[in-house]
Image (cartoon, rainbow, N blue to C red):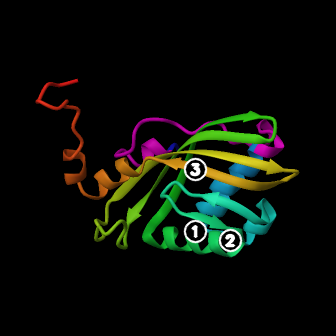
Amino acid sequence: MTTQRRYPELPGEAEIDLAPARLSGQKNVVRVFYKDLWDKADLSLVPQIFHPDFTFRGSLGPVLVGHQQFSNYVSWLTDTLDDYTSDILELMEEGHRVSGKLRFHGIHRRTLFGEPPTNSRVWWYGAPIFTFDGPLVRDLWVLGDVYGLRSRLDPAWSERLSFTRAGGASS
């Protein structure tokens, strides 16, 4: 079952084929990271994926170091968004780096960015860059569409976006 059929409110992009036999070793680590660690909140996988002092810059902005800080972040976000899910839309690999395009989503059950729970499915895109050192990830940097998420938490946010130049002319 594709994510689109399960959640019609999400954009119609399908996940890539995530069969482990079709993925390189590094891409398979990324698959395990999102589909097992994040989607199942399986924190026992953290030391199997990351160096002890790895650095993490998350899609929602925090910069963290090490297993404990990262595990706390996973617990916080998966508690805040029930049924947290990561959709892997693209993966690219070059040397010791894997990057991609993802969509993250879940049901907003706790305050996020100061917004009270909406009890609806919210989502945002993320673009990760995993840097490997041997079989483990040394650094993970994720650019996230925080503005898109905030506008789904509170539609008034999207009204603040304007593409007008000074003097009122549209660009």
Q: Gap in Å between the C-alphas at discs 3 and 2?
A: 19 Å
Tell me what residue is drawn at x 11 percent, y 30 percent: 168
Part of the protein shown in magenta: 3-26
**Mark 3: which amino acid?**
Val
**Mark 1: which amino acid?**
Val
Pick whichever of labels 1 and 3 is earlier in the sequence.
Answer: 1
Q: Gap in Å between the C-alphas at discs 2 and 1?
A: 8 Å
The residue mark sitting in front, 3 or 2, is 3
Local secondary structure at mark 2: helix
Q: Which residue is mark 2?
A: 43
Q: Residues within 10 Å of mark 2 (few under 14, many from 20)?
A: some
Q: Which residue is mark 3?
A: 142
Pick whichever of labels 2 and 1 is earlier in the sequence.
Answer: 2
Residue 113: say if magenta: no
Tell me what residue is drawn at x 19 percent, y 53 percent: 156
Q: Residues within 10 Å of mark 1 (few under 14, many from 20)?
A: some
Q: Which mark is residue 150?
A: none
Local secondary structure at mark 3: strand
